[in-house]
Amino acid sequence: MTQHRATSYQLDITSDLQKWRSFVAIAELGSLTRAAVFLNSNQSFLSRLINALERECSTRLFIRTGRGVELSEVGAKLFVEVKDLLERAQALEHHIRADHREPSGTVIIGTLPSIGTMLMRKLFVEIKEKHPNVKIKIVEGSSGQVEEWLNDARVDIAILYRYGNLQPDHEELLATVDSYLIGYKGDKITNKEFVKFKELDGLPFILPSSPNGLRTTLDNIAKQEHVSIAPVIEADSLPLQKQLTEQERLFTVLPIHAVWHEIQSGQLQAAKIVEPSVQRSVVMSFSKSKGPSRAMTATASTMVKIVSEMAKQGIWHS
């Protein structure tokens, strides 16, 4: 008679993988503060968790420094094995859930105000209807802020502008947009369909402060065309750019989707810049330190669909 035996596993320190997920996040980011943001937790909780882990392991896992924390010699050895364990556990979980559940979870999207205003409402409506178990969290900021959030894995997806033809592997081109000279109601320069770049010479501009992709592009073209573009005021705030253009009879340069409603209502005017044109790409960039969950994939696919539909309205080129 065959005697059946169960495999014996004795788990104590590794019985809770969530605490080791925190360990890996702190090690990768090198800061309790950044890890707390990434894990949607708080610094004091993570500090207590690490202290508890170190007591269980009877050794120091981290060395506290003036700049944050670093792995100790023992912590560095454990890090490799723990990360491998978590990756295999995550693969198992994905395999279990893959074909039996609708996409679920929270997807954090970092975006620029000029893009988010047009896209995010439509995205929310579509996701709510087709993927009710997916929650969307939107954070807006400048290009530099959104890039930082993406690099620190504080956002899953970023919607950004790119200038030039370089497109990294982790980015997907969504659309190409033209730039327009934006003017106040009744202005003669923007009261036509097109404006040549040379006509921007000496205009009273409100533009983003440097470093900024648009400013760099405008300055480079202006140098080539022997045109003077010197803003009378610098502002990174899109609402302020539009408000001062309207009320103080200034000019700015924006994609048409950023002023779509103001153009329709007659508050502002827009003329497409030509000879040469000033184009930028709208890209969807993915966090390199996070695997594409089903919720992320569903959100990205919906985003591509929305951008394609909006291209038919003439907002951009898909």
Image: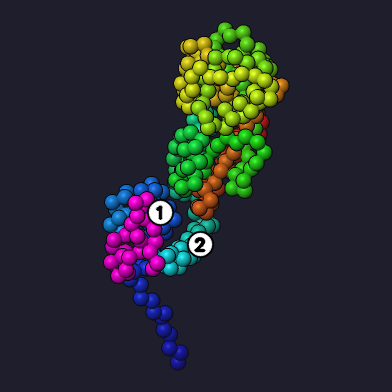
Q: Which residue is mark 2?
A: 91
Q: Which residue is mark 1?
A: 30
Secondary structure at badge 1 equals loop
List x then y, in percent, for residue 5. 41, 84
Looking at the image, which residue is at 32% across and 65% down?
Answer: 60
Of labels 2 and 1, the one closer to you: 1
List x then y, in percent, for residue 157. 52, 43
Based on the picture, tell me whether residue 238 belongs to the magenta stretch: no
List x then y, in percent, for residue 144. 49, 37
Res. 107 visible in picture: no
Direction bottom: furthest residue? 1
Closer to the N terminus: mark 2 or mark 1? 1
Q: Amino acid at mark 2?
A: Ala
Q: Amino acid at mark 1?
A: Gly
Disc 2 + disc 1, Cβ < 8 Å: no
Number of on-image labels: 2
Q: Which residues are magenta?
A: 50-74
